[in-house]
Each structure stands twice: as C-alpha cells, then as structure tokens.
C-alpha cells in the first residue's frame, strides 16, 4: 500500500478502508510515514470530511494505540462524562459524586488545565492532601467500594491521538469535525466506560462558535459511540459567559460544594442536573430524563450527594472536612481586589475566554504544561449577563497572592470583558439541544444562532 495513493483517494473524496486507515495511523505512529504525508491526509480530511464508518475506524485505531483501562471488575454500567471545555466549568466535581450517589459507578480520568480553561485534576489538588495519582488496582478498588474515583490521565493513553493532534495544531487542521470527534471519543473509549455523556459547549468561550456546528460535532460523536458499541448522548450548552461565578481552582471547589449542598448558582445547578440525568438514564438508574433529574434533585437536597463527595475526598487522602467548612480548609488568597463598573447599565455580554485569561494571569492557570499554579488565585464574578450595575459597583473580585503588573493586567482584562449597555440583552438559554442516537432535539427556540 502506498501512502501517496491513500492521500490522493481522500483528496478526491474517496472513502478509506479499515486497512488503509490502519496503514496511515500505525505507519505515522511508528515513524514509517513522515509528518508531511500525515499532514496532507489531515488536510484532505479537512476539505473532504469522512464517512461515519471512517471516523469510527479512526477512533478505534487511536483508542487502541496505547494503554486502555479495563473497568470490567466494577459491577454495573460505568458512565463517563466529557466536556469540550469551558471557563468556570466545575461540573465534574459536582456530577461525579451526584451520579455515584444515584448508584452509577464513575471511574474517571481527568486532565490538568492548559491555557484559559482549568482542569479537574488541578481543582481537586487544591484540597489539602488530595491525591490524584492512584495505581490502577487502588483506583478500581475505590470505585468498587464507594462508587467513585477520579485520577489524572495515564502517560501512555491514545499516543496516536497525541501525535496527530500535535501535527494538526501546526497544520491548520484542528477544526475539522470528524477529526475532533475521533480525537475526543478515542480518549473516552480508551478510558473504559460503557456509556458516555458529552457536554458540547457553544459560544465565545468555546471551541464551537455556533449551535449548528456544536450539534454537528455532537452528532458525529454520538454516531461513533453507536458504531463502537458505547451508547453516547450529548447536551449542547451555552458558553457565552462563564459557568457559575467562580473561576480558579480552590474557588471552584468551594462553589461546587455549595452546589452539592443544593445552594449553587442556578446555571451551574441546571447544567449538572441535565448532564447527570443523561448519565443516570444511560446507566440504567432512570427511565426518562425527567425521572433522572428528579432523582438527582432529591440527592442534592437530602445531603447524599455531599456525603458522597465527603467519602470521595477522604478515600483519596484529602481533608473530608472540606465538605462542611470549605473556606476554613481550602487555600485562600492573601488579597482581594474589586474591579468596578465605569458606567451604570445592564451587562450585555461577558467574554468568557478573557475572564479565563485574567484568572490565569493571577496564577490560576498555566501557559506551558510545566508552569506551577496558585490554587487560591482566580476571579469571582459579582455580575453576570442581564444584571443591572451602578457606576462604581463591583463587577468581579480578583483573588490573588501576586502583586503588581499581574493584578493590573488581570483587572484590565476583567474590566474589558464586561460590555455594559442600556437595553436588556437578548439572552440565549443555557441548555440548547440534546443529541442522542435517535436524533437531535432543540430544547429552546432561541437556540438557532
Ligand atoms: N479536543 C480534543 O481532545 N481533540 C481535538 O481534536 C479538539 C479538541
């Protein structure tokens, strides 16, 4: 088989067979196929797309390229959740104990943050003593015992995706829906869950800028799940402004705990209930989304979700008292600086990406993977879209240990990310569409942007 013939076939709109895709992926990973030929194929896919069969085959090849987790020793249907990434997205911290309290086992691998979005592992590590590195046996035993464990990603999972993603990043081929879909799903499949729930974000703080593009990506991933026997569903949710109020590691843990107590922000609570409902339905613990939502609401309000979080923190070496008195246990920033509104009006929009960048500038995130982070640093929003503000009133509070130019730069980023106007803004609902193997259902008429 000659690589050039496969590139030409794809360039001309043909469909590659399993053998041809195996030649490409394995050949690229073992060094037989050079970067320039792999890049030419990725560009051909960018322009010609892939059939659902090609995308499923590519996904499985990448999933099988390195270590895979075998969760079969854990009884029941294991359901994983993935978000395409957003600012202030602390949903895993809430949903994992919530659905575990409903009887769905969660054996989750999560990542660290890079750039303007934070990672679940960094957030959990802000809890004193919390260990995110467990050996495989301890990880599986913990899920069998308490129904829940979250650890960092193992070094050798989906190496083919890592290599191809790095190539796509420098050849302008990242934003191809079939390539994004297979990249995300390969990691979920290697992580071993039987069922997968996806939160596909749309908006200024997200990869996908339109609802139609987000639905297309979700449909591609749901189709892969079906083809490879891992039932998958997805929710399309708005990321035109950060989720909840807190951005930054310990700050987000604190907000997650108040949500687990049933006292969280409305948007964050609604999103967690919706994604959690999809998980309990796929996990066989509820017949419909409405039943699942009601079950989870009960667990938030009767203390069982918070109790599961407490057990989870204790099992991984953290101080379980964080569930009861988070402010006394989590690291706190030495200084708080308010960013005030220059004019009165109504908040029209908030640039989520820019707020994420402000938190990062204060030390909450890393620019390169070796940077240290400050767990206490971040931004707490005071105003959100649609809120009225008086001149001089705080828009947000910077929490920082750093001083000087970093704080001034973060304040400027926060201040310019808020757009204030006179008229009430048109607000897009948070929950936009549900995508399952049965089709795509719009939840809101206004979703069509
Ligand atoms: N996230 C991924 O994991 N892969 C992509 O290709 C794009 C975003």
Image: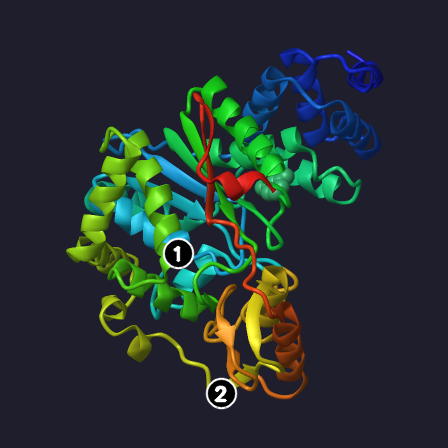
Task: Give the class, few, some or many, for how many residues have Cα within 10 Å of label 1's Cα (few <14, many ≥20).
Answer: many
Q: Is residue 127 visible?
A: yes
Mark 2–mark 1 Cα distance, whole angstroms, equals 26 Å
Residue 163: % across, % down: 68, 38
Q: Earlier in the sequence, mark 2 or mark 1?
A: 1
Q: Quadrant of the C terminus?
A: top right
Residue at 39 percent across and 61 percent down: it is 124
Residue at 26 percent across and 34 percent down: it is 74
Residue at 34 percent across and 68 percent down: it is 129
Q: Is residue 110 above or below residue 350?
A: above
Q: Nearer the viewer, residue 284 or 440?
A: 440
Label 2 vs label 1, nearer the camera: 1
The answer to whether mark 2 and mark 1 are in CB contact below 8 A is no
Q: Is residue 379 visible?
A: no
Residue 42: % across, % down: 75, 30
SS of the residue under disc 2: strand
Q: Is residue 84 above or below residue 357?
A: above
Q: Which mark is residue 335?
A: 2
Ligand 1's quadrant: top right
Residue 385: % across, % down: 52, 64
Task: Give the class, few, some or many, for how many residues have Cα within 10 Å of label 2's Cα (few <14, many ≥20).
Answer: few
Q: Quadrant of the N terminus?
A: top right
* Residue farthest toward the left in the current orientation of the protein: 302
Beta carbon at label 2 within 8 Å of ligand 1: no
Left or right: residue 211 versus residue 256 is right
Q: How many marks?
A: 2
Q: Which mark is residue 12?
A: none
Q: Which mark is residue 268?
A: 1
């Amino acid at each position: 088989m000659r690589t050039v013939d496969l590139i030409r076939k794809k360039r001309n709109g043909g469909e590659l067979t399993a053998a041809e895709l195996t030649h490409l992926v394995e050949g690229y990973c073992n060094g037989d196929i050079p970067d320039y030929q792999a890049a030419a194929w990725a560009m051909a896919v960018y322009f010609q797309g892939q059939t659902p069969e090609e995308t499923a085959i590519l996904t499985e090849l990448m999933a099988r390229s390195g270590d895979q987790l075998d969760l079969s020793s854990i009884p029941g249907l294991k359901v994983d959740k993935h978000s395409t990434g957003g600012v202030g997205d602390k949903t895993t911290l809430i949903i994992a104990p919530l659905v575990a309290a409903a009887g769905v086992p969660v054996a989750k691998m999560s990542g660290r943050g890079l750039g303007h979005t934070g990672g679940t592992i960094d957030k959990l590590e802000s809890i004193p003593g919390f260990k995110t590195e467990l050996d495989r046996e301890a990880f599986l035993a913990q899920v069998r015992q308490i129904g829940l464990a979250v650890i960092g990603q193992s070094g050798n999972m989906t190496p083919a995706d890592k290599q191809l993603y790095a190539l796509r990043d420098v050849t302008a081929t990242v934003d191809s829906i079939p390539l994004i879909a297979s990249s995300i799903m390969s990691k979920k499949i290697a992580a071993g869950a039987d069922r997968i729930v996806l939160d596909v974000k749309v908006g200024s703080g997200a990869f996908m800028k339109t609802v139609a593009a987000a639905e297309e990506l979700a449909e591609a991933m749901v189709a892969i799940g079906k083809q490879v026997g891992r039932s998958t569903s997805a929710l399309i949710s708005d990321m035109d402004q950060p989720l909840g109020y807190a951005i930054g590691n310990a700050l987000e843990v604190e907000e997650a705990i108040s949500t687990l107590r049933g006292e969280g922000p409305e948007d964050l609570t609604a999103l967690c209930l919706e994604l959690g409902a999809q998980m309990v339905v796929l996990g066989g613990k509820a017949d419909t989304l409405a039943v699942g939502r009601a079950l989870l609401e009960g667990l938030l309000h009767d203390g069982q979700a918070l109790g599961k979080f407490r057990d989870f923190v204790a099992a991984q070496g953290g101080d379980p008292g964080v569930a009861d008195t988070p402010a006394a246990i989590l690291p706190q920033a030495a200084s708080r600086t308010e960013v005030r509104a220059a004019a009165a009006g109504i908040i029209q929009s908030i640039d989520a990406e820019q707020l994420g960048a402000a938190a990062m500038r204060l030390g909450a995130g890393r620019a390169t993977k070796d940077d240290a982070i400050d767990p206490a640093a971040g931004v707490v929003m005071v105003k959100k879209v649609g809120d009225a503000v008086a001149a001089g009133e705080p828009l947000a509070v910077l929490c920082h240990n750093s001083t000087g130019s970093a704080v001034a730069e973060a304040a400027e980023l926060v201040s310019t990310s808020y757009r204030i106007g006179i008229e009430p803004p048109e607000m897009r609902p948070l929950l936009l569409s549900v995508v399952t193997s049965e089709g795509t259902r719009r939840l809101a008429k206004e979703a069509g942007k």
